[in-house]
Image (tube, rainbow, N blue to C red):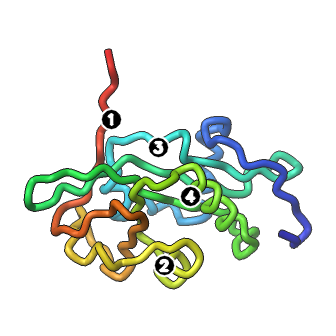
């Protein structure tokens, strides 16, 4: 990746101190980030460990993270389709534009396989590099304000219906 640093490991985000992750998210997106619609979409859920990763530099510093969340699209017809919400993808501000976010996203896509994925993000970036598009999201609603062109999805099983995207609370076997 150049720029005088080396990512030595992509590790499970579960291996990283949660306070370090929160501090990175604040630096990357601002302390008001929790007001964003994406936080409402995934409210009450826990990040999916097998799809959430961290990039760690040679000196042990946290360089970036990607988190994925269980969500569902409840179609107006009543059908509910389980999906994975990608993001945030956060990179230490001094290291942005260095390819760390891209490496994290590629690792997550590899782990996700063919699951239906959705995100709120820059279509010029996520469509060009990762195949996310707004083709099937035009009738989706979110619990807050968003720019429809930034609501993107990827995967053959992404539904094309009108409906509401919200948290998918995973059932824990007792």
Rendered image: mark on residue 170: 1
Q: x, y (%) of residue 156?
A: 38, 64
Mark 2 and mark 3 lie on one chain; the one further toward the N terminus is 3
Mark 1 or 3: the one toward you: 1
- Give the residue number, with chain letter if any, for mark 3: 47
In the rendered image, which quarter contains the C terminus?
top left
Q: Is residue 52 above or below residue 109?
A: above
What SS does tag 1 mark?
A: loop
Q: Quadrant of residue 76?
A: bottom left
Mark 2 or 4: the one toward you: 4
Mark 2 and mark 4 lie on one chain; the one further toward the N terminus is 4
What SS does tag 2 mark?
A: loop
Rendered image: mark on residue 145: none
Mark 1 and mark 3 lie on one chain; the one further toward the N terminus is 3
- Give the residue number, with chain letter if any, for mark 4: 109
- Give the residue number, with chain letter if any, for mark 2: 122
Q: How would you rate the neighbour count of disc 2 (Cα within 10 Å): few for under 14, some for 14-19, many for 20 or more? A: some
Mark 4 and mark 1 lie on one chain; the one further toward the N terminus is 4
Q: Residue at x 16, y 68 (%)?
A: 162
User: Cα distance, mark 2 to mark 4?
Assistant: 17 Å
User: Cα distance, mark 2 to mark 1?
Assistant: 28 Å
Is 19 placed left or right of 148 in the picture?
A: right
Is 63 placed left or right of 14 in the picture?
A: right
Is 42 placed left or right of 97 in the picture?
A: left
Q: Is residue 98 above or below residue 49?
A: below
């Amino acid at each position: 990746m150049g720029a005088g640093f080396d990512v030595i490991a992509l590790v499970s985000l579960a291996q990283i101190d949660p306070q370090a992750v929160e501090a990175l998210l604040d630096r990357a997106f601002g302390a008001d980030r929790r007001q964003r619609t994406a936080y409402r979409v995934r409210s009450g859920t826990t990040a999916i460990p097998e799809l959430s990763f961290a990039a760690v530099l040679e000196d042990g510093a946290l360089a970036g993270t990607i988190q994925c969340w269980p969500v569902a699209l409840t179609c107006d017809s009543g059908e509910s389709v389980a999906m994975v919400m990608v993001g945030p993808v956060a990179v230490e501000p001094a290291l942005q534009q260095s390819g760390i976010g891209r490496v994290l996203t590629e690792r997550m896509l590899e782990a996700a396989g063919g699951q239906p994925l959705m995100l709120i993000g820059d279509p010029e970036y996520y469509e060009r590099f990762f195949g996310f598009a707004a083709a099937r999201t035009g009738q989706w609603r979110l619990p807050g304000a968003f720019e429809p062109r930034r609501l993107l999805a990827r995967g053959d099983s992404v539904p094309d219906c009108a409906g509401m995207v919200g948290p998918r609370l995973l059932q824990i076997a007792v």
